[in-house]
Amino acid sequence: MVGVQKIEKVIIKNMEKDFSFIEIAKEVVFEFKTKFDNEKDRDFVNYQLYVSILDDGNIQTSTSPNVLKKGKECLIILAYSSLAVTNYYRWYAIKHIDKNGNIHEGFNSDVWSIEINWIGSWANKQIILKKEGEELYSVGVWSLDNPLEEPFQKLWDFYKIVKNCSSTKEIHYVAENYELKERIKKQDDVIRGLDFVKKKLEMERDQYRSLLKEMKEMIKGDNK
């Protein structure tokens, strides 16, 4: 009887997901790229960040779609460049593949949403978390090689903490402490870097002292 129940569970699980997130993601990228084939002032940028949302609410990110294998739902962040006045600037679009394989524009979960927009100037982008349209937290995008992986992970970690908060006041309190912890972490990194430099300088100093001592011993020997 137990064996029959296990088989039934496997059958139900397979029926629930008879599609591949990877294949859907490839089609999403292809269709997105096609939109820019005949555009005059916009170009497709071959950068995608694939975000696999796991059963426990954590995420795995990669620039390869293979990371989507274990996800219960997925996000794909795509890039394109657009002419603004005289310069081209990079922009991002978010596609959400839900647990049923349906594709949605942007990420929206209940009252929560994530978007990518500019800050200060078109060249500077930020990932923004909103609740009912109100901006609650944002992370700047600065890296050129893989600009979104680290900031998106940071934003998602914050989202996991606050999505069950009962009030906006509580969310703001968490945000302030979250930023404070980030600043402390950065200071710790700086201190560790300074400690490394200090130890390196001390080693160089000790080498010079040893060399100076050897030279003094040699001079004493020559004077005997």
Image (cartoon, rainbow, N blue to C red):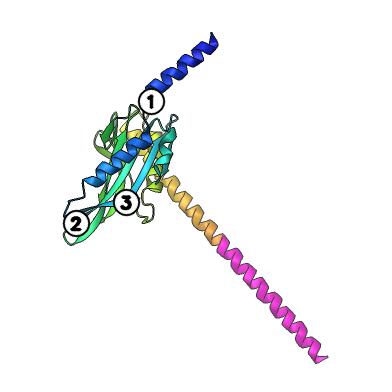
User: Hey, what amino acid is under mark 2?
Assistant: Leu
Q: Residue furthest right?
A: 224
- The disc placed on residue 17 is 1
Circle nearer the N terminus (1, 2): 1
Label 1 with label 3: CB-CB less than 8 Å? no
Q: CA distance from mark 1 to mark 2?
A: 41 Å
Give the CA separation, mark 3 to mark 2. Answer: 17 Å
How crowded pointer 2 is (Cα within 10 Å; few <14, some 14-19, many 20+) is rated as few
Q: Position of residue 98 (x, y in %)?
A: 32, 30
Tag in front: 3 or 2: 3
The residue drawn where x is 37% and y is 26% is 18
**Hey, which residue is sitting farthest bottom in the picture?**
223
Identify the magenta region.
Answer: 196-224
Name the kind of residue labelled 1 in the image: Lys
- Judged from the image, the secondary structure of the residue bearing numbered disc 1 is loop
Which secondary structure lies at badge 2? strand
Q: Considering only order in the chain, which callout, 3 or 1, is on the residue closer to the N terminus? A: 1
